Image (cartoon, coloured by chain):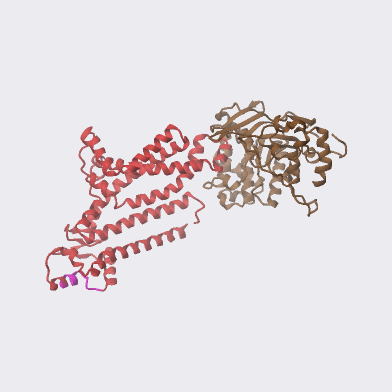
Chain colours: A brown, B red
Amino acid sequence: MSTAQPVTVRPPLSGEPFLSVEDLKVHFPTDDGLVKSVDGLTFSVRPGEIVGIVGESGSGKSVTAQAILGLHKGSRAQVSGHIWLGGRDLVAATENEMRQVRGDDVAMIFQDPLSSLHPFYSVGDQIAEAYRVHNKVSAKDARTRTVEMLEKVGIPNASSRYDDSPHQFSGGMRQRAMIAMALICKPRLLIADEPTTALDVTVQAQILELIKELRDELDSAVILITHDLGVVAETCDQVVVMYGGQCVEKGPVDQLFDQPEMPYTWGLLGSMPRMDRVRATRLLPIAGSPPSLINVPKGCVFNPRCRYSDRVEGRKCFTVHPALEPSTPEHEVRCHIPPAERQQILLTEIRPNL
Amino acid sequence: MIRFILGRFAGMILVLFIVSVVTFGIFQIGPIFANASPVFYYIGKAPATPQLVAALEHRYGFDQPIPVQYFNFIGGIFGKSITDGVSQTVQCPFPCFGYSFRQNELVSVLIGRAIPVSVSIIVGAAVLWLVGGVAVGTASALRPGTFIDRAGMTGALAAVSLPIFFTGPVLLLIFVYGLGWLPTIQYASLLDDPLRWLQSVILPWIALAFLFAALYARLTRSNMLETMGEDYIRTARAKGLDRRTVIVKHGLRAALTPIVTIFGIDVGTLIGTTVITESVFNLRGLGYLSIQAVTQQDLPIILGVTIVAALGLVIANFVVDVLYAFIDPRVAV
């Protein structure tokens, strides 16, 4: 690593990871072939830490989240590898065991709060239901607790809004209600799958702030799935960049934004609109489209879109699948370009355009 | 809510008004365009002098302006208590649809006798086909592509292709003449003789239910497949709910909502149209009554049955609309 840029590294959170995903593979057999939605993903999350998973649509982010919750069980998906959660392997767990985990140890917030809430039941009842599955309490106590949660997530007049149907809530309030539902059992891991994508920008900030506050309060681990790098920079401690079902780069958020090393990450950063940049500069989209998950490119998954594969000798990018290798102790990159060369490209070609 | 119900109620009255005007128009005014007197509905093809025809027209009010005739007819339903019998005047209490000269009886009495038969057939069959259809459809939807699904859907296709005049006699052949489990059918009122009532309606239930259950199985299957892919089902699973709760409380509840609408319309439509079932099983319901009336050109009965059938359909729709407001909170109330 060069010393040209001072890098601020946030002190890593201490403690054992609460969630460890090891070599996770989620494959879906279809008539056209095996869809490798997630192919060998490894990452971990410690209590109180927010890990962002970023990547384009179809990169395997949501499939990963659903695998952690065991939602692929009972479907055709083939899940292998390990998902260690507090000492238990969720990949091996049965549907019944997973049911105990869902909503209690691990809770999830989904992308579209309107379609994620049942249209025929009141918002309050749906939240109370989540509480009553895992806690033996009376309907009255569940209601009290639900109103408490609704207040906590900032729903005004919570006790009178309890009986409202989802369609009577605004978009932001629905997502608040979803958060209340996810947090009512005080989960130790919260997975937020694009929680702000369907919301307008002002509400986005409030929702992210709310997730952070609740993380601080419960010391829960959080996985934030998003394609919005602004959200990542604002919220996360660690970042996992996914491409074609694989992790192509991961590390602490500051390192990833200051010293990105993988050409795909460069592309992502270059295509991000920024207020602190000269307006006239064009956004730089990544050429091409995400890879087919059935016929995954040989060698590096990113090679069809990579502008730098000619910098690697012997067409290695097209023949050898690169390993995820540490560039600093916390920062890992999956790329054949030699580290020194990557630094050079970053300095001369990438950073001036960011 | 009250405004909603009143609104639907007003719509219901309007539909009935239109139905009564149209049926009255077709049967009462139709003959005039054909240059025949409606009196011939009453006296048949008997040779009559013009004087006699005129006298009868006057007696039955056909010489009055058509709107007056219509209001006399409607007014009759709501309690003009005297109508002309064959040779004497007859007390005709509400609801008075006039007098059938062919059957020599008040239309309301004939209809009143037929309604319990029709309702017995329809209600029992409706319960059977709803439960059976939804069960088969759900089982199919939960295991799409498996043997259960294929068997269920093949069965449904077979059932929907078999007309009642086939399944009916087959059922009779097996259960009455073959196995002898049921006596030859003789309808009895539920209140008089419950056992015989059940014996007389059970086969019609099965025959009718078989046909409709097939449709409901296919509908339930496709609705359920769609519903189980919804985001809120994923949410329900993510809460840690057990499979049964997810399927029944979250899945079926949503999948069945559109079926309620169709169910209401189907039940309503069947009132007065179960002709084939009634003839196959020798039951004298509204369908039988109306077919008999049509072949005999018995105008008062046709008018009466049409209005009763329309009333049945309209009430069924009204009930569904009101129910729907409770089932789906998104329906503006």
Q: Give the camera-side residue of A124 and A37.
A: A37
Q: Note whether B100 is above or below B149 in the view shown.
A: below
Q: Give the camera-side residue of A178 and B90.
A: A178
Which residues, given as a range, are shown in magenta? B54-64
State whether residue A114 appears in this view.
Answer: yes
> Which quarter shows the N terminus of chain A?
top right
**Residue A24 falls within the magenta-colored stretch:** no
**Residue B63 falls within the magenta-colored stretch:** yes
Q: Position of residue A238 (x, y in %)?
A: 74, 37
Q: Position of residue B93 (x, y in %)?
A: 24, 61
Q: Give the camera-side residue of B158 and A349.
A: A349
Q: Is residue A289 left or right of residue B68?
A: right
Res A223 quadrant in image: top right
Res B100 quadrant in image: bottom left
Q: Position of residue A153 (x, y in %)?
A: 66, 46
User: What is the total number of numbered labels drawn onto the structure image?
Assistant: 0
